[in-house]
Image (cartoon, helix red, strand yellow):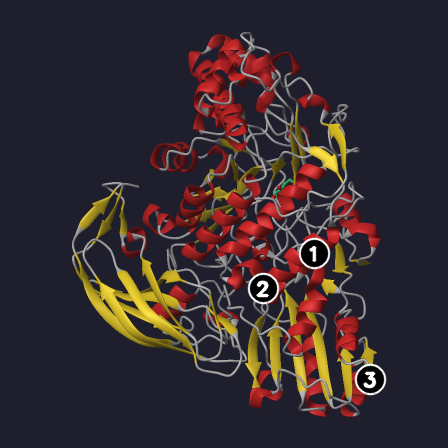
């Protein structure tokens, strides 16, 4: 499926490295061009034709920047995240790689063209809408093609295990099923455009603080039932060509050097047939390839280009390396054939930004979550006389997240606020970017005759005075998150709590719009009339916010992450190692001298709402929660047991507006053991009075325990209690059914 118009002008510039690709089946010297053969067969044929030197070509790539020391950007390479040379003699195209899940990134300012900014992946998760994940994935892949890329480093699937983690906005929430479905569909959408997707960061890269030296420690069973399950489900659905291993260590082994993660779990148990690429600068020794790493990315920022000369020598002397070299090449080529990058090289061309922004808007429309709506404060009437709009750069646009995934809109229209910081990263990366989709303008457009006045919120007293003089006050509060840094706590930064408190005290008809990359605490909540969580809402975020405020869009987002009442409720009230720097000194073994442990055995597989259920803690807002301008009722629950649970029920719109609902199915007791797990969800659109029957069959792995000694899933014999609800804390109809004991392969 293509989401971009075929009417746009195609400039016809083929990637230089792809120019040698023949597309007919008649060339005897290149039998692998026959697309009727399987990707495996074709990959084998290419490897058989490669010289020993050629076999090293695909195994490493450079960071494709104009200014990194060490290596020059070869002709034909696109400026972007990475570049892996092709082999023209054999018609093998180069791999041209760009970040990331939210659109074509320009993080280091090397690409000036701009791109369509999707809302944060966390906002996509809040849509609970698999179709939108596919559609938005296809849209950014189309932009990648038109920019000359054939690999998108997209498919962030780490679980939001810590609500302060700097990259949660790039991931799809705290639940393995939700993350697996949405990351998988997004990958499927990307690859539908002949672009290879790279699910990442495998695995347990669940905090950013000192990410390259920490060790995430967890049992095999707990990992398989949580973080690894999200990856497993996403890989099954999306079949990504590549997996990017993470910076951190897992149980004291670097993720990119982990026999357990790469050889045992990924390649043996899950039968993953693509390739493992390293994260940039994450390779510390040659032997990582024996533990399953297939490609060294960003090689000039590693201590050595391990997968060139050192590998050549090792392969000349040792059959284990020779075997691996062939296998590494086979895996890379197999994914290239499977995605169709030989037959469908990227073609540079114009992008229909207006059209693509509408795809971003579909996501923001459904991803914004209405958290509070006292006395039906929202939707606002269009006959409102005056509104005070305060703070959050709402005059300019909507906040976005920083780091390698940073997208900027075309034409340099974003507002950029430099945040400072040491070195090159400080200059290039640490910038708040507000996408030019101004909520202020969008609000003004809704009510052209009303008085809409903006105050930047710099002085709470001044903002409060303005608020007191208006019918309604809307405060925009932002939380900027960036790769490589976590939030120290759940509080909004830079005194915004005080601003909101002052404004709500001056005008009780105050609406707070949050643009955050994570859950935040809300000490002012009871004084507000309404609260919207808009995350980082992307290219049309301002318009979506206004559409929801005035009821032109009925909000349907649901929280993909628990909003805790305080840090004290978390398994780790403080972020482990907070304030520590990345390590610089590595021992000969490749281990960091100043490494430290992060204990994930505390909550184990009980991430997010599961932890809150286990500890019987009441969050500020529960996973799955979100209000609508209409209401829904569930009835006629039927649960059939046996090998797995088959659940059906009716959902009815009992309000007066059309709206979308996300009924959620949770198991709450498994064969006598308490514990909550999401086993199904569905997004439905219903007219007033309309009802629909929903049926779903649970993936039995969601009902099972991982048995570490048998290396299999184990479903216990007994009764399973199920509830269908409007959030993890809001069961509406409940029942139970019996399951038979069974064991399932990994
Ligand atoms: C990030 C990856 C990204 C890569 C290339 C790394 O720092 O962790 O997510 O794909 O850089 O830009």
Above or below, 314 relative to 679: above
Q: Secondary structure at mark 1?
A: helix
Can residue 575 be seen here? The reply is yes
Q: Secondary structure at mark 2?
A: loop
Query: Which of labels 3 and 2 is toward the front?
Result: 3
Label 2 and label 1: CA atoms lie apart by 24 Å
Image position, residue 175 (x, y; %): 43, 58
Marker disc for residue 449: 3
Query: Which of labels 2 and 1 is toward the front?
Result: 1
Residue at left offset 76%, top offset 65%: 397
Which mark is first along the chain, 1 or 2? Answer: 1
- Left of 736 or right of it: where is 261? right
Label 1 and label 3: CA atoms lie apart by 28 Å
Residue beneath disc 1: 357
Of 240 and 647, nearer the camera is: 647
Crowding around mark 3 (Cα neighbors within 10 Å: few <14, some 14 to 19, many 20+) is few
């Amino acid at each position: 499926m293509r989401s971009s118009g075929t009417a746009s002008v195609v400039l016809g510039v083929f990637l230089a490295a792809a120019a040698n690709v023949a597309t007919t089946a008649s060339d005897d010297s290149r039998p692998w061009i026959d697309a009727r053969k399987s990707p495996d067969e074709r990959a084998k044929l290419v490897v058989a034709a490669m010289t020993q030197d050629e076999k090293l070509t695909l195994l490493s790539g450079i960071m494709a920047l104009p200014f990194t020391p060490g290596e020059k950007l070869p002709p034909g390479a696109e400026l972007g995240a990475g570049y892996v040379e092709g082999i023209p003699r054999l018609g093998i195209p180069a791999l041209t790689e760009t970040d990331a899940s939210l659109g074509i990134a320009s993080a280091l300012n090397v690409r000036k063209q701009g791109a369509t900014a999707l809302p944060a992946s966390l906002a996509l998760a809040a849509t609970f809408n698999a179709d939108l994940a596919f559609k938005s994935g296809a849209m950014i892949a189309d932009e990648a093609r038109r920019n000359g890329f054939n690999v998108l480093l997209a498919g962030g699937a780490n679980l939001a295990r810590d609500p302060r983690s700097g990259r949660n906005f790039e991931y799809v929430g705290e639940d393995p099923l939700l993350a697996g479905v949405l990351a998988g569909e997004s990958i499927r959408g990307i690859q539908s455009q002949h672009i290879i997707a790279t699910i990442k960061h495998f695995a347990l890269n669940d905090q950013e603080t000192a990410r390259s030296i920490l060790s995430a420690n967890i049992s095999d069973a707990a990992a398989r039932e949580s973080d690894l399950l999200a990856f497993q489900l996403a890989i099954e659905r999306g079949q990504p060509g590549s997996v990017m291993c993470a910076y951190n260590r897992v149980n004291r082994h670097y993720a990119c050097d982990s026999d357990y993660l790469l050889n045992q779990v990924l390649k043996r148990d899950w039968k993953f047939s693509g390739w493992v690429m390293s994260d940039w600068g994450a390779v510390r020794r040659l032997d990582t390839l024996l533990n399953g790493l297939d490609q060294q990315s960003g090689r000039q920022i590693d201590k050595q280009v391990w997968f060139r000369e050192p590998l050549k020598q090792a392969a000349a002397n040792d059959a284990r390396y020779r075997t691996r070299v062939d296998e590494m090449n086979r895996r890379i080529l197999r994914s290239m054939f499977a995605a169709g990058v030989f037959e469908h090289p990227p073609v540079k061309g114009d992008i229909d930004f207006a059209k693509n922004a509408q795809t971003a808007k579909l996501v923001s429309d459904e991803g914004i979550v209405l958290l509070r709506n006292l006395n039906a404060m929202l939707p606002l009437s269009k006959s409102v006389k005056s509104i005070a709009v305060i703070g959050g750069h709402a005059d300019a646009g909507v906040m976005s997240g920083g780091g390698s995934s940073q997208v900027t809109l075309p034409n340099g229209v974003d507002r950029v606020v430099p945040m400072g910081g040491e070195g090159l990263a400080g200059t290039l990366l640490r910038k708040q970017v507000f996408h030019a989709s101004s909520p202020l303008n969008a609000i003004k457009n809704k009510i052209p005759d009303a008085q809409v006045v903006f105050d930047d919120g710099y002085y709470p007293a001044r903002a409060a005075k303005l608020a007191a003089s208006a019918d309604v006050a809307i405060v925009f509060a932002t939380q900027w998150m960036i790769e490589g840094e976590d939030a120290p706590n759940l509080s909004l930064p830079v005194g915004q709590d005080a601003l909101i408190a002052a404004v709500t005290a001056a005008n009780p008809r105050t609406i707070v719009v949050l643009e955050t990359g994570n859950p935040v605490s809300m000490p002012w909540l009871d004084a507000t009339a309404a609260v919207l969580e808009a995350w980082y809402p992307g290219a049309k975020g301002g318009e979506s916010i206004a559409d929801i405020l005035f009821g032109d869009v009925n909000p349907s987002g649901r929280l993909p992450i628990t909003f805790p009442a305080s840090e004290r409720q978390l398994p780790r009230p403080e972020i482990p190692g907070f304030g520590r720097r990345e390590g610089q000194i590595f021992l000969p073994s490749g281990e960091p001298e100043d490494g430290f442990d992060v204990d994930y055995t505390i909550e184990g597989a009980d991430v997010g709402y599961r932890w809150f259920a286990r500890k019987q803690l009441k969050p500020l807002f529960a996973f799955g929660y979100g209000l609508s301008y209409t209401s829904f009722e569930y009835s006629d629950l039927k649960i059939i047991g046996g090998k797995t649970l088959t659940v059906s029920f009716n959902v009815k719109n009992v309000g007066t507006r059309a709206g979308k609902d996300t009924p959620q199915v949770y198991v709450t007791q498994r064969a006598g053991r308490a514990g909550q797990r999401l086993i199904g969800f569905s997004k439905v659109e219903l007219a007033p009075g309309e009802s629909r029957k929903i049926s779903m069959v649970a993936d039995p792995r969601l009902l099972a325990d991982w048995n570490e000694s048998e290396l299999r899933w184990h479903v216990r014999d007994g009764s399973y209690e199920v509830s269908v609800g409007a959030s993890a804390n809001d069961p509406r109809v409940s029942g139970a059914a019996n399951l038979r004991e069974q064991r399932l392969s990994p």
